Image (cartoon, grey):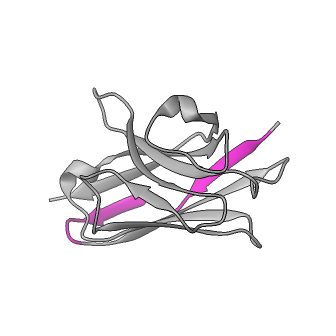
């Protein structure tokens, strides 16, 4: 059983930065793509970013492209989401997810394990 643990969320002013981390417990995730999703109050969960097993391929939602960067350190078994130029509309609970394959995209069915989420709040 894979458990994913997110950290790094918090309260930040608009224009600020945060870096989220996701690490697994129980099993390695180095053979799989990884992704980040978010869910704002009253809204459906939406895709944010994904990274392939090797880290050579990344994919972003249009709303975060150019501001967010997904990366991974397989030696540390950690995935990161660097979030810059944050906006109030980025406020959400952010979830880390493990892909079923070595690459994954924006569809939630491509992921089979999810973390509990970390809250990101951006004040205006």
User: Which residue sits furthest left?
Assistant: 124
Q: Is residue 7 magenta?
A: yes
The answer to whether any part of residue 79 appears in the image is yes
Q: Is residue 81 magenta?
A: no
Q: Which residues are magenta?
A: 2-15
In the rendered view, does 92 fall on the left or right side of 55?
Answer: left
In the rendered view, does 66 fall on the left or right side of 111?
Answer: left
**Which quadrant is the C terminus positioned in?**
bottom left
Pick the front one: 119 or 112:
112
Q: Residue at x 68, y 47 (%)?
A: 4
**Image height check: is 114 above or below 53?**
above
**Image height check: is 42 above or below 1?**
above
**Which quadrant is the N terminus positioned in?**
top right
The answer to whether any part of residue 9 appears in the image is no
Q: Position of residue 33 (x, y in %)?
A: 62, 51
Number of labels in the image equals 0
Q: Position of residue 84 (x, y in %)?
A: 31, 71
Q: Position of residue 36 (x, y in %)?
A: 49, 49
Q: Residue at x 85, y 47 (%)?
A: 26
Q: Position of residue 41 (x, y in %)?
A: 30, 32
**Image height check: is 80 above or below 59?**
below
- Provide the major secondary structure of the magenta segment: strand
Residue 87 in which image quadrant = bottom left
Pick the front one: 72 or 90:
72
């Amino acid at each position: 059983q894979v458990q994913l643990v997110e950290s790094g969320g918090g309260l930040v002013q608009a224009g600020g930065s945060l870096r989220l981390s996701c690490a697994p417990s129980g099993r390695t995730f180095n053979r799989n793509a990884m992704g980040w999703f978010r869910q704002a109050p009253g809204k459906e969960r939406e895709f944010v970013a994904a990274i392939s097993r090797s880290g050579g391929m990344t994919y972003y939602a249009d709303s975060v492209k150019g501001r967010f960067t997904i990366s991974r350190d397989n030696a540390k078994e950690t995935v990161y989401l660097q979030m810059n130029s944050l906006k109030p509309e980025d406020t959400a609970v952010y979830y880390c997810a493990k892909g079923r394959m070595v690459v994954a995209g924006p569809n939630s069915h491509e992921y089979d394990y999810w973390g509990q989420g970390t809250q990101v709040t951006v004040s205006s």
